[in-house]
Image: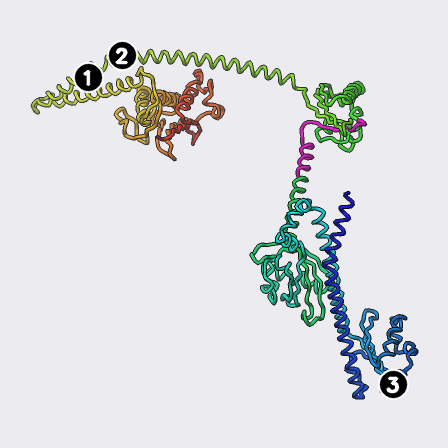
Amino acid sequence: MKINKTIWIVLKSLLIASIFFLPIYLFILNAYQTDVLNHLEYELKLEKSLHRNGSDDYSHIANAKHFTLKNDLHSFFNNKNFLLLKKSFSQELRNEILLELSLHNDFSKSLRVHGKCYIITFLLSPDQIHYHITIVHSKNLDDLYKIQTTLITILYISSIMIFLLFYTILSSHKKLLLQKKKLSSSLKESRLYFNNAMIGFLIVDKNRNIINVNPILCSIFGYEEAELLSKSAKILHVSQESYEEWGKMIFATARESSVINIRYKMKKKSGEHIWVEISGAPFEKNKMLNDGGVVWTAMDITTQITNEQTIKTLNNTLNKQLSYLRLFLDTAPIPIYVNNKDGLIIECNTAFTKIIKSQKKDVLQKRISDFLPKYLATIHQKKDEELLYKDSIHYKEILSISTHYSDIYEFYKTTIKDENQYNGYICVMVDVTEHEEQENKLQRMVWNEVQKNKDLAQAHEEERLNDAKFKAIGQLSAGITHEINTPLTYIKGNLEMLLMDLETLPNDFKLKSQILDDTKEMQNGLQRIAMIVESMREMSQQKKDYIKETNLYSTLVTSLIMANNRSKHICNIYLNDELFSMEMQKEAYSFMINIQAQRVEQVWIVILNNALDELQNIKTFNEREIRINCYEKDEKIVVEFSDNAGGINEEILENIFEPFVSNKPEGGIGVGLSIAKRIIDDQGATIRAYNRNRSAVFEIIFTKL
């Protein structure tokens, strides 16, 4: 059935090619014969004219040979003047000439000898005794013959291309057969399809001006016929450079050779670039084509080029993937080898050759047993026999290549089957020599983690107890601050009244000035006590600490007041470049965010105490400092603590916020910063530590309201 379809496609393609070929061939042949007859008639008239005028001067006829013979029809072809043409006179041609001579007194005949066309003219003299015979080499007939040959050659090529094109279309497009009824019912679509499938013709002269085109070429390039005729072929090129390159390389070659075929990128009227397969052949010495024109045939192969590029890309991708697979096999650290059904190694990777201690060329076509001691070879051979009835096996065994070492490998062997028949196997080897050691190491790591978790749980318990202590202290502090606040208010009021009374004393009272100064000093002291009491009251509140809108700057001032009793003996502290004092206003800056104020203040105290611990061990008071900056940046609020104690030890910097990480020689347990980070995380903020110019920096970033 398939052969019958193929024959049908071939016959159909031949029919289409014949429909295209035969009319054009007959037209070319008829045109050629007509031109030959015209030349013969012209030559006969010329000879008659010369003979009538009694002239024997034939010098104006190039390469002409004139002679006279008696009216002896049978002796014509034995004359020496016919020696040049004698072999070309067949018996049939002789009979034809003799018949013409018997019927007519004059006639002309064309003959092609050794690639040249000759015209023989016979004129009977009035006395009917002699024949005047002229033999002329006709270059015009040579040119006509070459044009005919060129056109027929192009026609042959075009017919073959049409045949191949339709054969490809009819044999490869299955959808065309399935939609035959639909396509046959749509004349417009059918015409469009066949117009696109046909070949375009383009004829240009030696100056590359377009002389003639057919409708198919117009449809390929999107032009009307009138838009192309007499125009330069430059309009079909993508650029001036392309046009010039075509003229120098392709057009010049086409004019010199018989046929040229090339794929070239050209341009449609719309500006779209297309790929065209072009074949060309020259027309030489033709007045119509101005000596040197070329006939081109064109087919739009844009889709074919696109498909070829796609296939090329896919092939490149496939080759790359195969290269990657081979590279993966060769670079895989795990030994891999492949056995065929005869037990011979047919492929292996570099890792396998290393453990075998042989080059790959020495391993291939060998058995694994060739590299093993006899007792191990026997073990592996028995295991391989299991693969005859199993899809895969897995076992652990010693691999000893020499007496100097031996390792333990796990062998993973999977069968290769061809039509369900055993065809060998792939073996992957995993070195498990250190497996036991790794298990022991893992157990030690688990034990260490358990101990660490126990220590962490103990630290959390201590933290919980400390929280309980802090709550108790907070309750006690709340009571104390309340009890202190009442008499403190009474003393402040009475002191203010005393100050007013002292102001009323006469100015000449000797001790007035001294008493006023002492009283103001007492008033300042009471004010500082009031600030400390207020800060203690804020930090010891017993209500649950909810997240609420808070001024972050205020929490920093509160924490500095609480730490002042220690910090004033160690170093100066600057808040936003201002030296801290107990009188510093909490609302000097406003950085409003949602936080748990008391927990954040606890973080500030932890960072301050760590900095003070480091600073008190170095330099003198005037050389120490802590700088705290609070500012806005990119819709964030940043708090930055820095000191000049020399920076954080690089060994602990990466893990500084983990529990039990401490650099204090006096035995700190290293949970302060861990707690601080947890508090900051609970606020939806971030904290990080780093060194900058021998300074330890803690940066905390909050989201702005």
For numbered disc 3, what is the local secondary structure? loop
Which comes before the other along the chain, label 2 or label 3? 3
Left or right, residue 99 beside residue 16 = right
Left or right, residue 268 beside residue 415 = left
Q: Amino acid at mark 1?
A: Thr
Quadrant of residue 544 within the rendered picture: top left
Closest to the observer, 327 or 11: 11
Which comes before the other along the chain, label 2 or label 1? 2
For numbered disc 2, what is the local secondary structure? helix
Which residues fall within the magenta stretch? Answer: 320-343
Q: Answer whether residue 325 is magenta in the image.
A: yes
Q: Amino acid at mark 3?
A: Gln
Gap between marks 1 and 3 measured at Cα: 168 Å
Say which mark, if any, is on residue 489: 1
Q: Mark 2 — residue? A: 479
Q: Amino acid at mark 2?
A: Gly
Q: Position of residue 472 (x, y in %)?
A: 33, 11
Q: Position of residue 253 (x, y in %)?
A: 70, 62
Q: Examine the rendered structure and indicate whether residue 34 appears above or below residue 517.
A: below
Gap between marks 2 and 1 measured at Cα: 16 Å
Q: Residue at x 22, y 21 (%)?
A: 527
Q: Residues within 10 Å of mark 1 (few under 14, many from 20)?
A: few
Which comes before the other along the chain, label 1 or label 3? 3
Quarter of the image for the C terminus: give it.
top left
Q: Position of residue 571 (x, y in %)?
A: 34, 24
Q: Residues within 10 Å of mark 2 (few under 14, many from 20)?
A: some
Q: Mark 3 — residue? A: 128
Marks 2 & 1, CB-CB < 8 Å contact = no
Instruction: Give the mark toward the camera: 1 or 3.
Output: 3
Q: Answer whether residue 420 is magenta in the image.
A: no
